[in-house]
Image: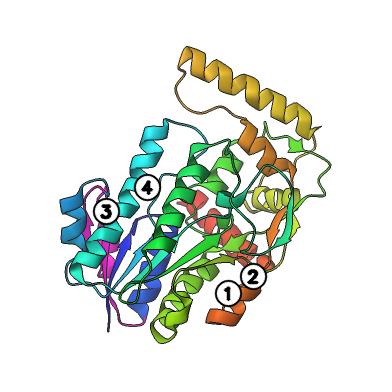
């Protein structure tokens, strides 16, 4: 039995990791800003705190054997300072606390967006460089944090950074509900041929745990970064339409060009900044690039180094998602 800290344990991925760790007999502590009675009911020790608070982070790390750092501020819009505090300062505080408390193993949830340069990416591996410029604060701050985690790796503090792309499945509180909520206004961006990687929630959680297990046995993996996915790239709009179908919504029929979406994104960004509007624009330059280009990745390194193989296929995953959404709608 290991004592494991999961940051963001109440979130989509964090909870999935926590549940799998509990199932195999580990003792799990969650660290989040909110309170999660449902986690406590499962047997998780729930600790509330802010990653920007060094002392709270240090106390959360006390007595732990390994840390899964899943918590982050996602999204495509907001103040840079908020993203930096959550994604960079929080990660620095956590790494420093781990070293102070003698925690040897650290699994960091990064994102493929840290290497997205606005152009199509097909079958790229971990050698692809970071871009010089970013069109959103999330990938920029996640990249800063990822670099920090890589550099923090040392003999007595082993790290692995994982880059899961578009996590989806039952209990998704981000991607799936956003698509379903915008079903009537969605437009296909581009010709519809651009392929993307996704990853089903259980596969993403499995990859994190497998990486941690192998990191203990193979110190040479420390400091490395890995793409993880379904290993089954599909046209983006096929995936979007599958999500819509799972929620009982019709498929997208209207289209716009990538150039048009990019121009709209630039205009909306300007308007939101000038008038300091609340919420986030329906389109941004970063989002237009994400929606209109291919981005799928070679996961050979994850297969080789920590035996990652997705156990749940896309079709089975969407069957599970459909069943969950039907249950939610009937409650």
Mark 2 burial class by Cα count in 10 Å: few <14, some 14-19, many 20+: many
Image mark for residue 299: 2
Q: Which colouring convention does the figure follow? A: rainbow
Q: CA distance from mark 2 to mark 3?
A: 30 Å
Outermost residue toward the top in this view = 275
Q: Earlier in the sequence, mark 2 or mark 3?
A: 3
Marks 1 and 3 sit apart, C-alpha to C-alpha, by: 27 Å
Q: Position of residue 167 (x, y in %)?
A: 55, 57
Q: Which residue is mark 4?
A: 88
Task: Give the SS element for disc 1.
Answer: helix
Q: To which residue does mark 3 refer?
A: 93
Q: Which residue has dot 1 on it?
A: 302
Is residue 265 placed above or below 322 in the rendered structure? above
The local secondary structure at tag 3 comes to helix
Which of discs 1 and 3 lies nearer the camera? The answer is 3
Nearest to N terminus: mark 4 or mark 1: 4
Residue at 42% across, 65% down: 16
Q: Residue at x 32, y 46 (%)?
A: 89
Magenta region, residue range: 24-50
* Mark 1 → mark 2, Cα distance in angstroms: 5 Å
Question: Which residue: 59% across, 42% down?
Answer: 132
């Amino acid at each position: 039995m290991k004592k494991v800290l999961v940051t963001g344990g109440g979130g989509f991925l964090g909870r999935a990791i926590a549940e799998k760790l509990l199932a195999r007999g580990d003792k799990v502590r969650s660290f989040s800003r909110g309170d999660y009675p449902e986690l406590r009911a499962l047997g998780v020790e729930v600790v509330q705190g802010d990653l920007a608070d060094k002392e709270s982070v240090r106390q959360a790390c006390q007595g732990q054997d390994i840390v899964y750092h899943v918590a982050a501020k996602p999204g495509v819009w907001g103040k840079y300072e908020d993203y930096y505090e959550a994604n960079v300062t929080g990660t620095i505080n956590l790494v420093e606390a781990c070293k102070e408390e003698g925690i040897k193993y650290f699994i960091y949830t990064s994102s493929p967006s840290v290497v997205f340069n606005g152009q199509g990416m097909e079958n790229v591996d971990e050698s692809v460089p970071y871009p010089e410029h970013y069109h959103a604060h999330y990938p920029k701050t996640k990249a800063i944090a990822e670099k920090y985690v890589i550099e923090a790796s040392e003999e007595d503090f082993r790290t692995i950074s994982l880059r899961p792309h578009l996590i989806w499945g039952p209990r998704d509180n981000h991607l799936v509900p956003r698509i379903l909520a915008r079903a009537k206004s969605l437009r296909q961006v581009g010709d519809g041929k651009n392929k993307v990687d996704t990853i089903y929630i259980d596969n993403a959680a499995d990859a994190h745990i497998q990486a941690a297990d192998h990191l203990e046995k193979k110190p040479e993996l420390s400091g490395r970064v890995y793409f993880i996915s379904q290993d089954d790239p599909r046209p983006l709009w096929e995936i979007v339409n599958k999500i819509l179908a799972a929620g009982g919504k019709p498929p997208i029929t209207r289209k716009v060009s990538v150039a048009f979406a990019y121009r709209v994104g630039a205009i909306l960004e300007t308007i939101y900044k000038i008038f300091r509007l609340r919420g986030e624009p329906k389109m941004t330059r970063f989002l237009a690039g994400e929606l209109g280009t291919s981005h799928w990745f070679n996961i050979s390194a994850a297969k080789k180094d920590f035996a990652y193989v997705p156990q749940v296929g896309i079709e089975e995953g969407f069957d599970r998602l459909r069943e969950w959404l039907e249950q939610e709608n009937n409650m």
